[in-house]
Image: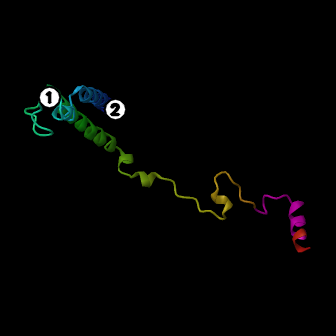
Amino acid sequence: MQVLANLVLVLQLLSALVMIGLVLVQHGKGADMGASFGSGASGSLFGATGSANFLSRSTAVCATVFFVCTLALAYLSNHRGGAAAAESVLDRAAPPAVAASGAAAIPGAVAPSAAVLPASVAPAASGAASN
């Protein structure tokens, strides 16, 4: 199954690269607009240009192959089989930790507690508070 996904991915990448090349090589409709405003006669400004040529048909075929490969990759990634495929990403997420204080919500911070302090420091801290 992984080999099929890799082949579809390679086909998708190749079709994308070929489609980019075909689009860059084609002559756009906007190029005729300059000719219609003074330097020649153009049949129409942005109207129908007749039948599609080889480059536009090849671009359409590459776009169709790219779209089919995208759908196939989405299907293959969603249906990998086994028990793990039946559960959602949210089911596999760890439950959030409940913060006891504001300091515990900061990543890497240690919340102070009386159990952490040495025995010699804890009475002195309470005695200083009463003075």
Quarter assignment of residue 115: bottom right
> Which quadrant of the view contains residue 43?
top left
- Measuring from the top left, give residue 23's x and y in whole percent: 24, 30
Element type at marker 1?
Answer: loop
What's the magenta region?
Answer: 113-127
User: Looking at the image, is 74 positioned above or below residue 125?
Assistant: above
Where residue 105 is drawn, which disc sits there? none
Q: Residue furthest front?
A: 38
Image quadrant holding the N terminus, namely top left
Name the residue located 78 percent from the left edge and 58 percent from the top edge. 116
Give the side of residue 22 with respect to residue 88, left or right: left
Q: In x, y percent, where is residue 38?
A: 17, 32
Q: Amino acid at mark 1?
A: Gly
Q: Position of residue 53 (x, y in %)?
A: 12, 28
Give the amino acid type for the residue marked by disc 2 in the picture: Gln
Q: Quadrant of the C terminus?
A: bottom right
Label 2 to label 1: alpha-carbon separation: 57 Å
Q: Which mark is residue 2?
A: 2
Tell me the number on the disc at residue 40: 1
Q: Callout 1 environment at 10 Å: few (<14), some (14 to 19), or many (20+)?
A: few
Magenta run includes residue 123? yes
| Count of numbered badges drawn on the protein | 2
